[in-house]
């Protein structure tokens, strides 16, 4: 674990009521409420995941997320050697590159317009959307965000993964340390 950490960001629209697909009522609208940015870090070997919801994907947010994610993984015995990202502005910013250099972590960037290169992060995001963000008719984006810690704990500690011989990521981590 830790040889490679995949990072990515997914924007989710903010909302203040259950959507028309659930209620059938198209009169209410949450247009113009903005977006939550889900910053995602996933270990290549164990699929252990760390996620934060931040207001944007600017360099300060992206770099702060990197530092907190590395601290979270280190607390679990995972020392990160390389980080893979796409070419988003926060990831190519000098501040982000400087942080990686100071931490002696190698930065691998995917080729433009090839999300499959960062497939583990992309796949995790699909799973997160299907099993958490869109699985329950949340009353608002705030209640959805409040539920993230519960889902992420379940994902890391209980959810079986076919690539890990039906073990959850936390159990796979214990088997490798």
Image: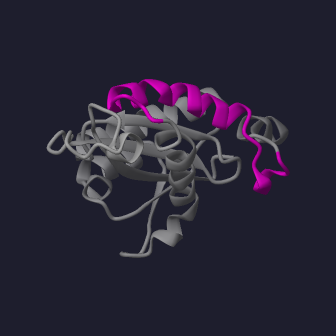
Instruction: Please state the horizontal and vertical placement of residue 56, each as a whole percent of the image.
Output: 24, 42
Left or right? Give the position of 29 relative to 78. left
User: In which quadrant of the rendered view does residue 37 lie?
Assistant: top left
**7 up-or-down from 75: above or below:** below
Residue 160 in magenta?
A: yes
Q: Residue at x 31, y 35 (%)?
A: 54
Instruction: Please state the horizontal and vertical placement of residue 3, each as a whole percent of the image.
Output: 63, 52
The magenta region covers 137-166
Q: Residue at x 24, y 53 (%)?
A: 94
Residue 12 in magenta?
A: no
Left or right? Give the position of 48 relative to 133. right
Q: Residue at x 29, y 43 (%)?
A: 25
User: In which quadrant of the rendered view does residue 30 lie?
Assistant: top left
Q: Residue at x 42, y 34 (%)?
A: 52
Is residue 143 at all visible to an observer of this figure?
A: yes
Q: Main secondary structure of the magenta part?
A: helix
- 60 or 82, nearer to the observer: 60
């Amino acid at each position: 674990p830790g040889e490679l950490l995949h990072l990515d960001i997914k924007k989710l629209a903010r909302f203040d009521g259950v959507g028309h697909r659930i209620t059938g009522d198209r009169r209410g609208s949450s247009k113009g409420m903005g977006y939550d940015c889900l910053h995602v870090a996933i270990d290549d070997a164990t699929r252990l995941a760390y996620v934060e919801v931040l207001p944007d994907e600017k360099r300060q947010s992206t770099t702060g997320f990197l530092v907190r994610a590395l601290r979270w993984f280190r607390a679990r015995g995972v020392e990160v050697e390389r980080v893979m990202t796409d070419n988003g502005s926060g990831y190519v910013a000098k501040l982000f590159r400087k942080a990686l250099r100071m931490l002696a972590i190698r930065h691998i960037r995917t080729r433009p317009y090839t999300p499959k290169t960062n497939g583990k992060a992309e796949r995790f995001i699909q799973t997160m959307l299907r099993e958490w963000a869109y699985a329950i008719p949340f009353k608002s984006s705030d209640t959805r965000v409040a539920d993230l810690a519960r889902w992420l704990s379940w994902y890391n500690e209980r959810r079986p993964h076919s690539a890990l011989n039906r073990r959850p990521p936390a159990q796979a981590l214990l088997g490798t340390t």
